[in-house]
Amino acid sequence: MIKTNLPALLLGLTAIASAALPAAPVHAEDQKPEQVHIRGSIVAYSGSVLKVKTREGETVDVTLADGWKLASVANAAVTDIKPGDFVGIASLPSEGGGDGALEVLIFPPAMKGAGEGSYGWDLKPNSSMTNATVADAVKGIDGRTVTVSYHGKEKKIAIPDGTPVVTIAPATKDDLVPGAVVFIPAEKAASGALAHQVLVGKNGVVPPM
């Protein structure tokens, strides 16, 4: 089952990983729809519509696009992070300088490079998302601090105790049950939110991003 689902899983999560990338300047007629991140728990799932109660307390209907992809997350550990790995880390600036991680996603090797860069993120006010490679030219992992590199730049991020660390896992539509936690990078459409991919929590592990 995992082998069957893996290509679709990777395709979907590649899109998830790059969902918040700032768009390059384009002509007005070529502009892409506005992106929105939906975080919350499932109220109901029926056909092509997923009803979600968001973390803000609002209940919204998310339309699932044709060919939409589904994946989940599984627990990992800081000790699983190795030089050369590609990771996605949401973080906040620390008072003493540098950044402190809010969550860490370890990507499968096939997804290396997805959404590479560091950019604003809406997990918390002033947070950022950094998709980058764990550096192997310097001390990649020093205690609970990881140095990552992207586009020729380096960034050091501390990983406090208790920071969620996850990796990608398969999921099926049977996992879309009421109460399941979801992270949905969607786009605003005339009819509401339109999603091409969904990340759902299962086995007690929730999408931390």
Image (spheres, helix red, strand yellow):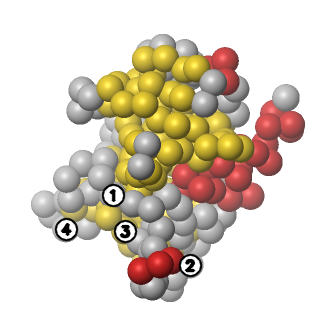
Q: Amino acid at mark 3?
A: Tyr
Q: From the viewer's perspective, is the residue at label 2 or at label 3 nearer?
A: 3
Mark-to-mark CA distance, 1 and 2: 28 Å
One can see residue 11 in this view:
yes
Please identify the quarter of the rendering in which residue 95 is found: bottom left
Query: Secondary structure under badge 2?
Result: loop
The residue indicated by pointer 3 is 119
Q: From the viewer's perspective, is the residue at label 1 or at label 2 nearer?
A: 1
Q: Marks 3 and 4: in contact by CB < 8 Å?
A: no
The residue indicated by pointer 1 is 121
Depth order, front residue of 127/186: 186
Please identify the quarter of the rendering in which residue 128 is found: bottom left
Query: Secondary structure under badge 3?
Result: strand
Q: Amino acid at mark 2?
A: Ala
Q: Marks 3 and 2: in contact by CB < 8 Å?
A: no
At 27% across and 57% down in the image, what residue appears?
A: 127
